[in-house]
């Protein structure tokens, strides 16, 4: 028997939490909060689980881990890089089971294949064989200039990131637009563990001088030291070179391009520079902007710009994935139905909107429907 229950994450930009029950094991895939602060999955009906798996450390995938005690405090499975971003007070060391960024492993005894998701350093997708194959993509991105994306195996059912719905714009165009805006000086706001190192690398590759906040610098220093795996060895060397030429210090100027956390200027250097807006600092946001954040307020007042930087799949990327893995059932997560009309049309009967369904028998069901 295998069954998937959507606890949270379908129907809008909602926190990720999906319950997979397979061969007697109960596995919770992600346990996020937000991105709207305070929005958490309702775990009251889940009961004890055998494992919690984290695709990556972003808050909308890993921000509700304090709810673990209502799930029997099970072991948590993630990569070393994901665990680095999670406090030991939230997940104690004795509950952590490390996964590779790519290859075979076991989760609660079930064989699993994982691969890099191209979305966050150390971020992975999960593939469970059997019952036609089940694939949990979490967030993913096939366009990253820095983070590798490993193609997953065939799967009859997939939960995939549809955050951008029908968006088609390519990252290469977006980088040009951001470079044009930033050339006169700008604070480019980025989430920790996100696109910061990639932004610095891409913009310096266009000949611009870029400075980074201490958080992004530490991320770059870490990536340079990994010598391959999380990113390619060639990119490690590029980052090392860039770190060698970037200026250090905390005398920030409005004329500079500064890549700084946090994504919506709610904390970090971005929040500090927000208080110095009257000195001429210009702000650029490129993430999902929750209501009530400093970024939201500034954009409402027309005091900042928002330009996209893709970190999720475009419509074509999703179509390519679904075609390649041969999925017969697709759970399109993290998007409002109004934002994925073309995707829904293309998927047709493959688009799954049930909150809970059996994975086994998918092929039988489709065969019967076709007769
Ligand atoms: Zn994410």
Image (spheres, rainbow, N blue to C red):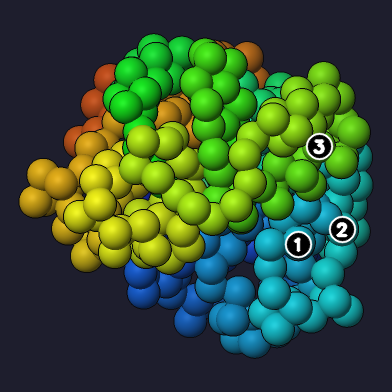
Residue situated in front as seen by the camera: 232 or 215: 215
Measured in 3D between alpha carbons, the distance from the residue under mark 2 to the one under mark 3, in whole angstroms, is 21 Å
How far apart marks 1 and 2 lie (CA) works out to 8 Å
- In the image, is residue 42 above or below residue 279? below
| x 27%, y 42%: residue | 282
Q: Tell me the SS state at disc 2.
A: strand
Q: Which mark is residue 224?
A: 3
Direction from residue 359 to residue 50 in the image, left or right: right
Report whether 187 appears left or right of 81.
left
Residue density around tag 3, few if under 14, some if 14–19, many if 20 or more, within 10 Å: many
Give x and y (percent) for residue 181.
Answer: 30, 25
Q: Nearer the viewer, mark 3 or mark 1?
A: 3
- SS class, disc 3: helix
Given residues 50 and 2, the one toward you in this image is: 50
**Residue at 60% across / 86% down in the picture?**
70
Vertical order, 155 against 258 (above or below): above
The x and y percentages for residue 50 are 76, 71
The residue depicted at 56 percent of the width and 43 percent of the height is 212
- Residue under pointer 2: 98
Kindly tell me whether residue 370 is visible in this rendering: no
**Location of residue 127 (image quadrant):** top right
Residue plotted at (46% across, 13% down): 172
Relative height, residue 225 to residue 59 (above, below)? above
Contact check, label 3 and label 1, Cβ < 8 Å: no
- Dot 1 falls on a residue whose secondary structure is helix
Percent x, y of residue 76: 76, 67
Using the image as rendered, state which of residue 109 and residue 1 is in the foreground. Answer: 109
**Residue at the left extreme, as displayed:** 301
- Residue 318 in percent (x, y) is at 48, 22
- Asked which quadrant contains residue 123, the reply is top right
**For mark 1, what is the residue?**
83
Q: Are marks 1 and 2 in contact (CB under 8 Å)?
A: yes
């Amino acid at each position: 028997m295998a069954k998937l229950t959507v606890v949270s994450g379908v129907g809008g930009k909602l926190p990720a939490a999906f319950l997979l029950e397979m061969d007697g094991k109960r596995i919770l895939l992600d346990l996020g909060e937000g991105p709207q602060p305070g929005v958490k999955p309702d775990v009251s009906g889940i009961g004890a689980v055998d494992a919690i798996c984290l695709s990556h450390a972003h808050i909308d995938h890993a921000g509700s881990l304090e709810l673990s005690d209502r799930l029997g405090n099970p072991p948590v499975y993630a990569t070393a890089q994901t665990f680095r971003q999670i406090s030991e007070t939230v997940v104690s060391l004795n509950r952590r089971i490390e996964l590779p960024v790519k290859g075979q492993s076991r989760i609660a005894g079930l064989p699993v294949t994982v691969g890099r998701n191209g979305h966050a350093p150390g971020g992975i997708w999960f593939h469970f064989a059997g019952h036609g194959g089940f694939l949990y993509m979490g967030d993913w991105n096939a366009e990253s200039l820095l983070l590798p994306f490993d193609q997953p195996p065939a799967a009859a059912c997939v939960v995939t990131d549809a955050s951008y719905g029908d968006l088609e714009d390519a990252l290469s165009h977006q980088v040009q637009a951001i470079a044009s805006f930033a050339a006169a000086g700008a604070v480019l706001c980025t989430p920790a563990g996100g696109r910061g190192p990639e932004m610095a690398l891409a913009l310096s590759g266009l000949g611009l001088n870029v400075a980074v906040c201490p958080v992004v610098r530490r991320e770059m220093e870490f990536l340079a030291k990994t010598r391959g795996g999380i990113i390619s060895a060639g990119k490690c060397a590029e980052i090392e070179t860039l770190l060698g030429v970037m200026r250090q210090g905390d005398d920030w100027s409005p004329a500079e391009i500064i890549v700084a956390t946090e994504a919506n200027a709610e904390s970090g250097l971005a929040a500090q520079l927000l208080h110095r807006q009257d000195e001429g600092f210009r702000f650029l946001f490129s993430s999902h902007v929750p209501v009530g954040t400093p970024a939201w307020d500034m954009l409402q007042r027309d005091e900042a710009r928002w330009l996209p930087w893709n970190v999720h799949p475009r419509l074509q990327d999703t179509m390519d994935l679904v075609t390649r893995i041969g999925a017969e059932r697709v759970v399109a997560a993290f998007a409002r139905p109004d934002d994925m009309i073309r995707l829904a049309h293309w998927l047709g009967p493959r688009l799954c909107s049930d909150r809970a369904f059996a994975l086994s028998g998918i092929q039988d069901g489709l065969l019967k429907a076709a007769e």
